[in-house]
Image: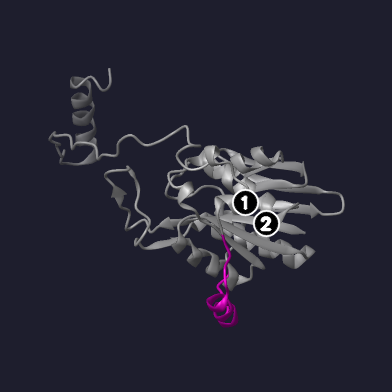
Amino acid sequence: MKIAVCIKQVPDTTDVKIDPKTNTLVREGVASITNPFDEYAVEEALLIREKHGGEVHVISMGPPQAIEVLKNALAVGADKVYLVSDRAFAGADTLATAYTVAKTIKAVVGDVDLILCGKQAIDGDTAQVGPGIATRLGIPQLTYVSKIKEISPEKKKIIVERLLEYGREIVESSLPALLTVVKDINEPRLPSLLGIKKAAKAQIPTLTAKDVGADENRIGLKGSPTWVTRVFSPEARGGAGEILKGELPEVIPLLVNKLMDTKFIK
């Protein structure tokens, strides 16, 4: 099977900075990590390859420093990795990003059996890029997958279990398809020493908009119908609280009376 995995480098959640002029995240020079949900996608691709054979191709779109997350993917066992990086991609929203990644998959991976993504990125939390890629490639999308129950490359069929808010759902789809996965699906492996050495020496190709055949009017800010106009912290609201002291039977009537006085309850 030929499997493509889409991963993203995100700022470490303890070190998020905003550019006040552009209202976008500052990524250069900021401590970054592989989007945690994407690590589960990489691991699931490796497990599928171990069972069914084939190749795992990992793609990341981002600034030059995003090469580090691709080295991590190589270290755990990915066959090929690609960095999609071009100043023309700057400011891309989820629509432009999905378009660019879809064009990259077509350009460098070709016909795929399966595309895996994390359910969402922890910096944007939109969960839109994976489904957007599927839409542009014209293939089925199976989101929030917690388990792959069956894959049949010969029959071009896959059966998965989806994690929903109030239960689980079993869905069957044709292949190729795109899956977004949740953390319940597996436990990502650690890289081996040999894998780390291999990744350190690897020459990772960097692809530009021209390399992937992207239309300049559909990438970056030009191709983004949504943008951030302002970023700010909400103003702190004043107000005083009151602590009711005493035993529970005494405190409950007092609390109810105060809630009724303030019209919270009637």
Q: Position of residue 235 (x, y in %)?
A: 19, 36
Above or below for 127 versus 76: above
**Disc 2 + disc 1, Cβ < 8 Å:** yes
Q: Position of residue 77 (x, y in %)?
A: 63, 71
Amino acid carrying mark 1 in the image: Val
Residue beneath the point at 57% across and 72% down: 203
Identify the secondary structure beneath mark 2: helix
Left or right of 33 on screen, residue 111: right
Residue ID for mark 1: 212
Quadrant of res 228: top left
Above or below for 198 versus 127: below
Residue beneath the point at 26% across and 45% down: 20
Left or right of 62 on screen, residue 162: right
Q: Is residue 141 visible?
A: yes
Q: CA distance from mark 2 to mark 1?
A: 8 Å
Image quarter hosting the N terminus? bottom right
**Nearest the camera: 219 or 148?**
219
Amino acid carrying mark 2 in the image: Val
**Tag 2: Cα neighbours inside 10 Å, few (<14), some, or many (≥20)?**
some
The mark that comes first in sequence, 2 or 1, is 2
Q: Is residue 145 visible?
A: no
